Image (cartoon, grey):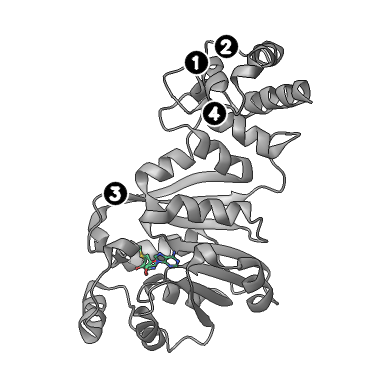
């Protein structure tokens, strides 16, 4: 087996050899702890039949661990300066394909069709660039990719929001969006000391396993998410005020909103953060029907 890329010593050697300077604007914080990398791959339950998609391979620390266990790894890297480095560090692995592209602009369906013709399942595994964690996760979910799920490292604070339950301070529209599509669980928290350079915040690894079906029946998804977002627009306001003030045409719909809340047995004085996903679904279904 080859020497791990992610040991502090080898990482420094590689960075020095190529005179690489970190770009903060690209969220470049590289992992230098092989134990944590292995735990990330363990959490993703990668087998020799799995296709792995990585976002932001950096100098290949996680890519290498994935390549040792997966059938194939496809990694999107935006920073051109890393391409020659990756070609070198990952040269022992014949099952890795690096795509030089902003993942937010990528046609991932096409990449999957081209690259993963013969795999049992597909997992996204990444130490995400922190400046774009939420857009990346939402793109991966709303693109409805044929993936089993994802195991990603991100800011601890964001991980807590994604996995939050009703009635907690972290619970919000992002929790509902993510939990509508996936079962979410925080796998571990990670101290800032295992990165170079060290980020300003602690991190966590979250596992999101795609649901076969949404946990609630919703008759208009786009409207459901509109209702959820409006309900959290001002956290200190009641659900009634938030819906009236923040739904498009909310003021004109005040009466229908009041009827829908009553119909769904939701006290209009409650705050959005206390509503379960089932309650949001009931509320948006009734309101949608009243507006037709
Ligand atoms: N995987 C490496 C590791 O764990 O050491 C590096 C992780 S670093 C937190 C994030 C990586 O994502 C960097 O290599 C950065 O250049 C890359 N990146 C940033 N924005 C990106 C984007 N929009 N699309 C693809 N890669 C991106």
Quadrant, the N terminus: bottom left
Near mark 2 (Cα within 10 A), the count class, few <14, some 14-19 or many ≥20, is some
Q: CA distance from mark 3 to mark 2?
A: 37 Å
Q: Position of residue 196 (x, y in %)?
A: 24, 65
List the residue tagged with mark 1: 238
- Looking at the rendered structure, the secondary structure element under dot 4 is helix
Residue 129 falls left or right of residue 102: left
CB under 8 Å between discs 1 and 2: yes
Q: Nearer the viewer, mark 3 or mark 2?
A: 2
List the residue tagged with mark 2: 268
Disc 3 or 2, which lies upstream in sequence?
Answer: 3
Q: CA distance from mark 2 to mark 4?
A: 14 Å
> Residue drawn at (50%, 31%), measured in percent from left and top?
165
Disc 4 or 3, which lies upstream in sequence?
Answer: 3
Near mark 1 (Cα within 10 A), the count class, few <14, some 14-19 or many ≥20, is some
**Nearer-the-camera pick, 283 or 146:** 283
Mark 4 beta carbon near ligand 1 (under 8 Å): no
Q: CA distance from mark 4 to mark 3?
A: 30 Å
- Looking at the rendered structure, the secondary structure element under dot 1 is loop
- Looking at the rendered structure, the secondary structure element under dot 2 is loop
Q: Position of residue 66 (x, y in %)?
A: 48, 72
Mark 3 beta carbon near ligand 1 (under 8 Å): no
């Amino acid at each position: 087996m080859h020497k791990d890329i992610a040991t502090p010593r080898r990482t420094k050697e590689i960075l020095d050899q190529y005179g690489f300077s970190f770009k903060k604007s690209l969220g470049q914080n590289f992992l230098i702890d092989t134990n944590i990398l292995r735990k990330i791959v363990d959490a993703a339950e990668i087998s020799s039949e799995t296709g792995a998609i990585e976002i932001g391979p950096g100098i290949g620390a996680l890519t290498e661990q994935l390549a040792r266990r997966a059938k194939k790894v496809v990694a999107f890297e935006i920073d051109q300066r890393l391409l020659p480095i990756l070609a070198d560090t990952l040269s022992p692995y014949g099952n890795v394909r690096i795509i030089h592209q902003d993942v937010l602009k990528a046609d991932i369906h096409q990449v999957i069709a081209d690259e993963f013709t013969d795999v049992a399942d597909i997992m996204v595994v990444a130490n995400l660039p922190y400046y774009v964690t939420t857009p990346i996760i939402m793109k991966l979910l709303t693109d409805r990719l044929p993936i089993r799920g994802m195991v990603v490292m991100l800011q601890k604070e964001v991980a807590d929001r994604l996995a939050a339950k009703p009635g907690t301070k972290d619970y919000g529209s992002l929790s509902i969006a993510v939990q509508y599509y996936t079962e979410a669980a925080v796998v571990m928290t990670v101290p800032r000391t295992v990165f170079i350079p060290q980020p300003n915040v602690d991190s966590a690894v979250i596992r999101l396993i795609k649901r076969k079906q949404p946990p609630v029946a919703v008759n208009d998804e786009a409207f459901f998410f509109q209702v959820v977002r409006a309900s959290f627009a001002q956290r200190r306001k009641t659900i009634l005020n938030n819906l009236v003030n923040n739904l498009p045409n909310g003021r004109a719909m005040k009466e229908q909103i009041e009827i829908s809340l009553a119909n769904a047995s939701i006290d209009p004085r409650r705050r959005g953060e206390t509503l379960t996903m089932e309650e949001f679904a009931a509320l948006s279904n009734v309101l949608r029907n009243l507006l037709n």
